[in-house]
Image (tube, helix red, strand yellow):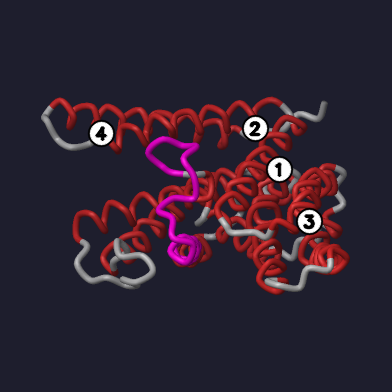
Amino acid sequence: MEHILLTHNVKVCLVVVYIVVALINVIALGLKFMKKNVENFITRMKSFWIILILFTLAFCINKLVAFFFIMLISYLALKEYFSMIPTRPSDRRVLLWAYLSIPVNFYFLYINWVAMFYLFIPLYLFILIPIRMVLIQETDGFLKSCGTIHWGLMTAVYAIGYLALYVIFPTHINPVGGGIGLLMFVLLMTIGNDFMQYVFGKTFGKHKILPIVSPNKTWEGFLGGVLSSVIFSMILAPYLTPLSTIQSFFVGIGFAIAGFCGDVTMSAIKRDIGVKDTGSLLPGHGGILDRLDSLIFTAPLFFHYIAYTFNIDIL
């Protein structure tokens, strides 16, 4: 089995993350003792502990386990998506193809055939799925079904697949953190931005940004997230990434914007369908897609920014 290299910086950051999460838990329990209404937050933290431990175990064992773990997340996300959106009875045979694309997509990455990963879902399935649907000869709702199925594949399989792409990222390009360092940076930045936008919005939020799409999103929350993301980026980047100070500054802004866009995009989909959450798998959080909505945007964008900035060819 091919083991995953965890640099000294990654191990230290991981310990710090556990300490910070534990401190947040202690503060939340203290607020509960003071009769503050933090029950939902404590429930969310319990779920977060489980997620954190699972991620740690998956990425500390070996490459195969990490890939299976990400593949499981992808499957659960796609299943949640197809359970949420309306589909035609005739689409069931096509949905089987969609599910089968998950192991194929991750196999390409496992054998380092990155070029095929880039093309498989955006190009080949974009062509093959409509062909399979044509053979069913059901034209009512054809275009809508094509669009919704392929969008689900792009988000739940292709975008989440970038997490595995970080795992095979060449370590010599990022000696301070390796591929896992970049992955940890993406996860911490995305989670930190989401959390701080929530905190600033709850504390100072008055002016709504998109009241129809997401009534709880405010300018104060968004700008607080931008400021926090810049600070997080400038602190974390020297230990986990090859970014310079000025690069980390703009990356922080980029994470805040991309994360916000991913969040409100999923909110628009949920409002279109008429659901509050994408699922109920994670108590206090909702579904898998409710937690991954920002990451679906940030993970691919940051990867290509790194690849372009440092002229990296990992095809």
In this view, the mark in front (2 or 3): 3
In this picture, is 66 found above or below 77?
A: above
Q: Tag 1's secondary structure?
A: helix
Mark with earlier residue (1, 3): 3
Q: Gap in Å between the C-alphas at discs 4 and 3? A: 42 Å
- Image position of 229 (left or right of 140): left
Label 4 vs 2, first from the N-terminus = 4
Instruction: Say which of marks 1 and 3 sits in front.
Output: 3
Q: Kindly indicate the quadrant of the structure image that contains residue 253.
A: bottom left
Whole-number angstrom distance, CA of label 1 to CA of label 4: 36 Å
Toward the viewer: 63 or 238?
63
Q: Earlier in the sequence, mark 2 or mark 1?
A: 2
- Look at the image and say whether residue 270 sits in the magenta stretch: yes
User: What residue sits right under mark 1 in the picture?
Assistant: 167
**Mark 3: which amino acid?**
Val
**Place of residue 311 in the rendered image (x, y in percent of width and height, measured from the top left):** 74, 65
In the image, residue 248 lies in the stretch drawn in magenta: no
Reading the image, the residue beneath label 4 is 39
Indicate whether 313 appears above or below 27: below
* Residue 130 x/y as whole percent: 81, 68
Tell me, yes or no, whether the two marked residues, 1 and 4, touch with CB atoms within 8 Å: no
Q: Which mark is residue 59?
A: 2
Checking the image for residue 94, the label placed there is: 3
